[in-house]
Amino acid sequence: MAAIDSAPAYPRTPRTTPTRARDRVSYDRDLVHRVLDDGYLCHLGFVRDGAPVVLPTLYARLGERLYVHGSTGSRPVRSAAEEPQGLPVCLTVTHLDGLVLAKSAFHHSVNYRSVVVHGLARPVTEEAVKRRVLDAVVDQVVPGRAADCRPASARELAATALLELDLAEVSVKARTGGPNEDPEDLDLPHWSGVLPTRTAYGPPEPAGEGTAPAYLARLTR
């Protein structure tokens, strides 16, 4: 996928400039937002006691800021609270779109979309903001669900932590298309092509009586 340089774009920095496959990177703001909005699972990387730690967790995007879900006892939340300026982190979101099968083992690849964000993660402390962000996280996973469940109680809200991370130093990288074959391999008898991958939801499994709401039906269609 060729780089997209249309405005508005995020600034290119040394940390967001790849060392290889530079033609696949983009700083296009709309493209970054689309990749983030298509997911809800991220991986948050940081350093704790001199060693790297990477944790999977849920997130939501509100404007030019990401919010990461956690608990008050989690490592990144405790670490962020200890840092006056915030916890240095690297957050990634990746979608796997296809398995690229070439005639040679070397040229096998994957089609993907991936966003990488560098920055300082800070705890969210204001109650009104926490409630608004928690609704956004729920709706990021299942659109429409926040209005169809009981909101967090004061005790539950106190046990829940959120980190905020500005979208300032960010890039998106993607690969599309078929395999890149060596000319001498084109006549080999092995099958080559792309095996698309998709996220699919099964039929809702109720915990009690009642019909699944319409917003779940939209996901399972």
Image (cartoon, rainbow, N blue to C red):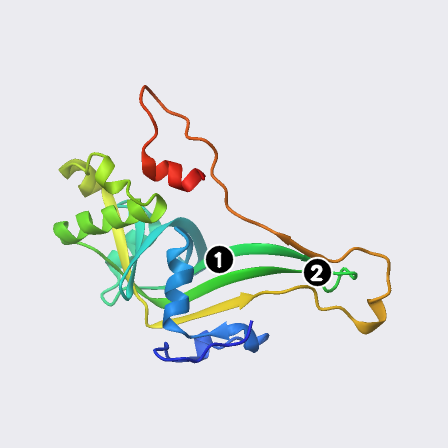
Residue 5 pos. (x, y %): 44, 80
* Label 2–label 1 contact, CB within 8 A: no
Please tell me whether residue 107 is drawn above or below residue 21 in the rendered image: above
Residue 119 pos. (x, y %): 34, 68
Q: Quadrant of residue 179?
A: bottom right
Q: Amino acid at mark 1?
A: Thr
- Viewer-proximal residue among 122 and 105: 105
Kind of element beneath mark 2: loop
Residue 97 pos. (x, y %): 56, 55
Q: Amino acid at mark 2?
A: His
Residue at 33 percent across and 20 percent down: it is 208
Q: Quadrant of residue 180?
A: bottom right
Kind of element beneath mark 1: strand
- Viewer-proximal residue among 135 and 189: 189
Q: Which residue has dot 2 on it?
A: 108
**The disc label shown at residue 94, or none:** 1
- Viewer-proximal residue among 202 and 12: 202
Q: Quadrant of residue 65?
A: bottom left
Residue at 36 percent across and 80 percent down: it is 7
Residue at 52 percent across and 75 percent down: it is 18
Residue 90 at least partly seen: no
Lateral position of residue 65 relative to residue 187, left or right = left
Lateral position of residue 35 relative to residue 132, left or right = right
Local crowd size for mark 1, using a 10 Å CA cut-off: few (<14), some (14–19), many (≥20): many
